[in-house]
Amino acid sequence: MTPPTATSRSMSTSRSARRVAALATALALALATALCAGACSGGSGAPAAAAFDGPPLLEVTSTPGALRLSLRASPSPPQRGLDELELTVVDAAGRPLDGLSIEIVPWMPAMGHGVSVVPTIRGLGDGVYLVRDVSLPMAGRWSLRTRLTRAVGATSPTSAAASATETAELGIDVE
């Protein structure tokens, strides 16, 4: 085997330098595109907030009856895929309830199954909760099996508060 000459080493170095330059250019272009997509859309890079306009899709009373829930959807009516919900919870006197622990399980009674995606729920204040990633993969009637837990009456600053749990079935039709 013959040793590499100065010319072949120079050509190899030149090819490597061109590859590095091309890679750097592609990376810079990808970064600029990503930054422009966030800035040019007028957003901060966060997903756009859903619009929950109009009257609630439904209003129900929990079991055993201490809470009233109203539900709005985006899109409305709910569509197959991932939907967002706005759940408003008030007590029997109409006072908004914050700080609840809420679990929602989408369930399709006609098919006897739920979904594997667990919705994320975040309190917004004034008894309003944003429910994201509600997976409704099929058209038809769905039941949102809802469990609401709240702390009630701690007897002293050092004692743990007891909790009260209410449940509700929120029936929605998915197109």
Image (cartoon, grey):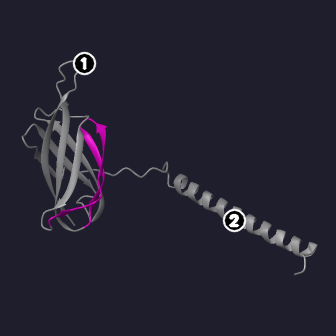
Query: In what element is the residue under mark 2?
Result: helix
Residue for badge 1: 157
Residue 121: x and y in percent read 29, 46
Side of 117 where 140 appears, left or right? left
Q: For the point 8% across and 43% down, which residue is it?
A: 63
10 Å neighbourhood of mark 2: few (<14), some, or many (≥20)?
Answer: few
SS state under label 1: loop
Q: Judge depth for marks 1 and 2 and give the one in front.
A: 1
Where is residue 141? Give x, y as percent.
Answer: 15, 63
Q: Earlier in the sequence, mark 1 or mark 2?
A: 2
Residue 23: mark in rendering:
2
- Mark pair 1, 2: CA separation: 61 Å
In the image, farthest residue toward the front: 1
Neighbours of disc 1 within 10 Å: few (<14), some (14-19), many (20+): few
Residue occupying the point 16% across, 52% down: 145
Q: Residue at x 18, y 59 (%)?
A: 107
> What is the quadrant of the C terminus in the image?
bottom left
Percent x, y of residue 19 = 74, 69
Check the image and report above or below for 91 versus 4. Answer: above
Give the quarter of the figure containing the N terminus. bottom right
Query: Which stretch is magenta?
Result: 112-137
Question: Which numbered dot is residue 120?
Answer: none
The residue type indicated by label 2 comes to: Leu
- Considering only vertical position in the picture, is 11 above or below 36? below
| Residue under the point 24% across and 40% down | 101
